Amino acid sequence: MKKLLLKILFIICPVILFAQGSYYDVVIVGGTPGGIMSAIAASREGKSVVILERSEHIGGLPANGLGATDIATRGATTGLFREFVNHILDYYITKYGKDSEQVKMCSDGYHFEPHVAAQVFDEMLAPEKKNVTVLTMRQFDAEAKNVIMEGSQIKTLKIYNRETKKQELYSGKVFIDATYEGDLGAAAGVPFSVGRESKEEYNEIGAGRLYKLWLGPELEGTTNEGDGNIQAYNYRLCLTNDPANRILPEKPKKYNRKEYLSLVDDVYTGTFAGVEMLDVTPEMQEANRKHIENGGITQIPGDPWGIAKITNMVDLPNRKTDANNQHLALISTDLPEENWEWPTADWKWRDRFAQRLKEYTLGLLWFAQNDEALPEAFKANVREWGLAKDEYTDNANFPRQVYVREGRRLHGEHFFTANDAYPVAQGQRPPLYESSITASHYALDSHAVHKREKGKIALDGFFNYQASVYTVPFGVILPKKVDNLLIPVPASATHVGFSTLRMEPCWMALGQAAGVAAALSIDQNKSVKELDVEDVQSVLMREKATLIYFKDVTIDSPDFEMVQYMGLKGYINGWNADLDKPVDNRTAEQWSAKSGIAIDKFEGKTRGEVLRAVYTLIK
């Protein structure tokens, strides 16, 4: 009876929770980099924050093998992401010396070992310990019963403590969904999408069913029809060829040799999914087979060999690599189709798939190193590589977290599409959003949706289209139907649009913006949707976040904030601000009309002088 009474009180009166220490200004579900940056940003604005992470470790994918930062233009995304990069660089300089090989291999802080990323996240959170509480082994199950709502606002979350096996309640003023899956938003009633939109819906490049060779043309079978299927997941492996730190994988208990047999013929014939295959003839493939049977290696142009045939590796410090799925392969570490249920599945199903994916991945490595059907020269190359002994020491040296490239995409005030990342004309910017909360840049990039199909030389859904540095509008993280929730990770976008937003630098930047917005919402007693975006932008610029990218004005420039503001207002249209150049007549007339300042005041001035004057008057 007493337990029942307490349960009723918890439901009808969440204020009881305050005294129990489970009330925070900002409640964040998901210890991903986006969630961590949300916490830091809100903390710097004086807010109490809790991060609720399901696993034993925070840090998401950068702490689980994604050590080669996915950003095409360095400097396009800054703020807390840039602080993270600087911490990485400082770590390697301090430990190994500025002229060390490790510093060189860290690529100015953009390439790092998994345990270093984990350490850096802890270092960045350390100064915020008075405001930020990090709780691990806290599971949120995406069910409506676990979200206590009052109208369009979340009041309390029910969280399962995986250690005590008991339920806990957390109340707050603003909530942030930083999960890769969009679990919180979905449970709170935010509409969402899973799968691929058709080309008809948004006229996007790469939309729907698509067969395309890497860097090549679209192929027969492409219909651009939408479906409910999602791109493949994998593990980002940390491999090394250092014998002193290398552990060769063992054959997993659930090993199915048949899954990997197609690799044998691919190796001998030099079959791969690159554009070069258009020029490969059957005669070339037969000659390649004979050459390999005689102890040689592949002679097919562009065909990866050995470990590169099954993983795409980027070098990290200390002879390690970030080993991803090989985009040129028809069989690699991705496991398409079997992950389709993940976005909306419960954690019991997700845990089963994570184990299945682990066994599949280890099985692939073991097969490539040992199977009798493969050529010895190929196996010898693969055997040079193994799991890094000093990574994930509590998890048998295997990554702890699945690379969830795309889960639910929650619907927000702005739906980001491929067209938001493409130039409006050659050499120009993509559409400019005055409400931008970050600039970012990576290709539109999706992995396969289906496994290899008979008669197809490419995997359905695999694409990579180059984009330009773009702006991300505030509405991408403002969900529909809920007024005190922000969604920096399961952001509002189409499948193709999300394929560029989903990179960790962008997620960190969106997380920072979410933390700032949460703090301002509390300070101004407004819902997150009622905020003036200029207030959010002002804090972000103060924290050196780039909202619009210019090639010639960095975050260290004294004109940084001015150029950011004036750029978003449409005063500077090109990729360069050209502050030292004189103002031409056409620009003077445009700025005069836009600002209402008399044109004669522009005469004989540089662009920088005029912009500073106008900025002072209109700001």
Image: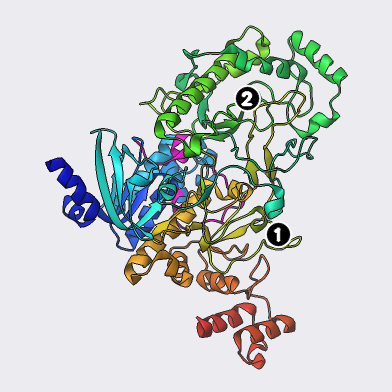
Quarter where residue 570 is shown:
bottom right
User: Is there a contact, CB below 8 Å, between mark 1 and mark 2?
Assistant: no
Q: Nearer the viewer, residue 316 or 276?
A: 276
Amino acid type, mark 1: Pro
Instruction: Assess disc 1: are there few (<14), some (14-19) or many (≥20) residues with their C-alpha within 10 Å of its C-alpha.
Output: some
State the image coordinates of residue 453 (x, y, percent, origin top left): 71, 25
Q: Nearer the viewer, residue 422 or 90?
A: 422
Instruction: Assess disc 2: are there few (<14), some (14-19) or many (≥20) residues with their C-alpha within 10 Å of its C-alpha.
Output: many
Residue that protrudes farthest toward the left in the picture: 2
State the image coordinates of residue 487 (x, y, percent, origin top left): 45, 53
Q: Which residue is mark 2?
A: 310
Residue 473 vertical placement versus 59 (above, below) = below
Tell me where the magenta segment starts and ends, as one range. Answer: 57-84
Check residue 81 for magenta coloring.
yes
State the image coordinates of residue 299 (x, y, percent, origin top left): 78, 21
Q: Which residue is mark 1?
A: 423
Q: Nearer the viewer, residue 387 or 451?
A: 451
